[in-house]
Image (cartoon, rainbow, N blue to C red):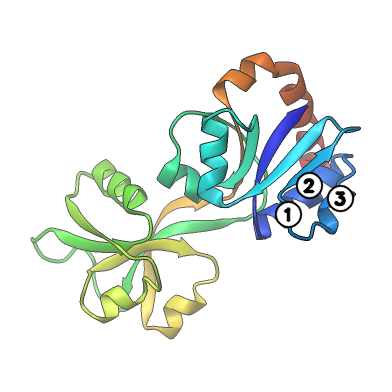
């Protein structure tokens, strides 16, 4: 049996819909109450509902064979697993944003970036050969440039309406984001047939 960790919330709902389109009966997950683990013996699957960062932890430590998680979480927290499929939902993007009408790159001093994703921000600017100072923000990161804490923010953007309402704009796209299927390194070898079957069924559903 393959044990699959699903990111709770919108990704979970979209993932269940995709699994059902692939021919798996996911009825128990529609009336789940407070349960967190669901076995589908006939399908040879077991689902575990978890927070995004925990999905990666469970897959990396091998207590789950696979996981469905956003690319944003992979970029910030991922280390050792295989990312084998783009599942075609949960589309948004990491963006560098700041005050409308300003040029982020003006001036000679190192820039300060506020973000919930310091690794993503640092990796992005490292790739451009630019030194930045990152400030970790847990809440509304849009406040940072408004209060003068940072020159810009790196955050997830879907519609951009929150930015616009606060006088901010997108300067540039850092990376596209969508839900991905990840697989434990050992499971990729030990359960290759089961994982190949799962990925082929998901691929057919995405193409259908």
Badge 2, how many Cα within 10 Å: few under 14, some, many 20+?
A: many
Question: Horizontal and vertical percent for residue 174?
Answer: 39, 53
Between residues 38 and 169, which one lies in front from this camera angle? Answer: 38
Residue furthest left in the image: 108
Disc 3, SS: helix
Which residue in the structure is indicated by mark 2?
18
Q: Are marks 2 and 1 in contact (CB under 8 Å)?
A: yes
Please, which residue is most extreme toward the front here? 34
In the drawing, does residue 155 fall left or right of residue 23? left
Residue 14 disc label:
1
Q: Is residue 182 above or below residue 115?
A: above
Q: CA distance from mark 1 to mark 3?
A: 15 Å
Sequence order check, earlier mark of 1 and 3 = 1
- Residue at horizontal 11%, vertical 65%? 107
Q: Determine which residue is flagged by label 3.
A: 28
* Residue at 90 percent of width and 43 percent of height: 25
Q: Residue at x 36, y 70 (%)?
A: 141
Q: Is residue 41 above or below residue 187?
A: below
Task: Tell me which label, 3 or 2, sits earlier in the chain.
Answer: 2
Q: Position of residue 201 (x, y in %)?
A: 81, 33
Q: Is residue 71 visible?
A: no
Any part of residue 30 in sight: yes
Residue at 47% of width from left, 78% of height from top? 162
Tell me if mark 1 has few (under 14), some (14-19) or many (20+) residues whose alpha carbon lies within 10 angstroms of its own: some
Q: Quadrant location of residue 168?
A: bottom left
In the image, residue 195 sits, relative to residue 98, either above or below, namely: above
Q: Position of residue 83 (x, y in %)?
A: 56, 33
Q: From the viewer's perspective, is residue 4 above or below residue 189?
A: below
- Select label 3 or label 2 by which is in front: 3
Tell me where residue 169 sits by quadrant. bottom left
């Amino acid at each position: 049996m393959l044990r699959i960790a699903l990111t709770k919330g919108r990704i979970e709902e979209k993932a269940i819909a995709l699994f059902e389109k692939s021919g798996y009966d996911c009825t128990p997950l529609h009336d789940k109450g407070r349960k967190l683990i669901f076995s589908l013996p006939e399908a040879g699957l077991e689902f575990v509902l978890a927070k995004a960062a925990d999905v990666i932890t469970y897959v990396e430590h091998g207590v789950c064979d696979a996981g469905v998680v956003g690319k944003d979480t992979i970029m910030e927290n991922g280390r050792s697993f295989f990312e084998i499929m783009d599942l075609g939902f949960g589309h948004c993007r990491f963006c560098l944003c700041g005050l409308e009408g300003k040029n982020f790159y003006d001036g000679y001093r190192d820039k300060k970036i506020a973000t919930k994703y310091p690794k993503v921000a640092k990796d992005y600017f490292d790739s451009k050969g630019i030194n930045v100072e990152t400030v970790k923000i847990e809440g509304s990161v849009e406040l940072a440039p408004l209060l003068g804490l940072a020159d810009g923010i790196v955050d997830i953007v879907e519609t951009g309406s929150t930015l616009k309402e606060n006088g901010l704009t997108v300067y540039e796209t850092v990376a596209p984001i969508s839900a991905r299927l990840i697989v434990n390194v050992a499971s990729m070898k030990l359960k290759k047939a089961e994982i190949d079957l799962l990925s082929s069924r998901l691929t057919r559903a995405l193409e259908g």
